[in-house]
Structures are given as structure tokens and as C-alpha cells.
């Protein structure tokens, strides 16, 4: 399992506890803006699948998620 940040200004230090290789991605230091993420999973037979989400961080700590 791997989370890829496809469009953003995040650094590896913003990912908490190597969570980009876990089911739940945990981040710090997000600033207002839009972030696009891609989750890729693979099984032990080599089959792969992925999905993308756009995260919008708004002023005042509100968050909006759009799955694409």
C-alpha cells in the first residue's frame, strides 16, 4: 500500500510516522489549499489498483474531501 502526493507542496517531514505506507495517511503542517492524493494497493499475486482523492483545506481548519 502506498500513498502518493501527486500535487502539493508537502515535504517528507509532513508525513507522520511513515503513514504514507499505511492504510490511513496522517499529515501535519497542512496550509490552506488543495492537495491531490493517490492510493495504490497491490496483492501478493501482483494485481494492483489505485484511487485518487482531492483534499481541500480551508481557513479555520475545515476540510473537504472529493474522491475522483
Image: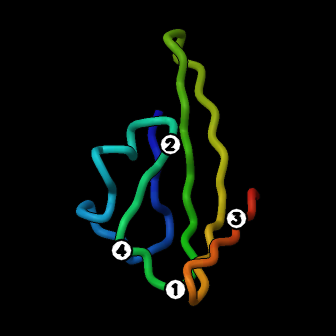
Q: Quadrant of residue 13?
A: bottom left
Query: Is label 2 in contact with label 1 (beta carbons under 8 Å)?
Result: no
Circle 2 — which element? loop
| Vertical arrangement, residue 45 with respect to residue 28, above or below | above
Mark 2–mark 1 distance (CA, rounded to whole Å):
21 Å
* Quadrant where the image shows the C terminus: bottom right
| Vertical arrangement, residue 48 with respect to residue 22, above or below | above
Disc 4 designates what residue? Answer: 29
Can you give x and y, in whole percent of width and height, for residue 31 in the image?
Answer: 44, 82
Mark 3–mark 4 distance (CA, rounded to whole Å):
17 Å
Mark closest to the chain's N terminus, 3 or 4: 4
Tell me which residue sits at (46%, 60%) in the image. Answer: 5
Disc 1 designates what residue? Answer: 32
Tell me which residue sits at (51%, 36%) in the image. Answer: 23
Query: Is label 4 in contact with label 1 (beta carbons under 8 Å)?
Result: no
Q: Nearer the viewer, residue 44 or 14?
A: 14
Amino acid at each position: 500500500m502506498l500513498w502518493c502526493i501527486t500535487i502539493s507542496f508537502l515535504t517528507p517531514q509532513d508525513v507522520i510516522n511513515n503513514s504514507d505506507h499505511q492504510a490511513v495517511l496522517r499529515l501535519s503542517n497542512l496550509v490552506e489549499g488543495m492537495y491531490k492524493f493517490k492510493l495504490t494497493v497491490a496483492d501478493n499475486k501482483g494485481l494492483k489498483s489505485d484511487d485518487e482523492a482531492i483534499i481541500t483545506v480551508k481557513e479555520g481548519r475545515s476540510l473537504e474531501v472529493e474522491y475522483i
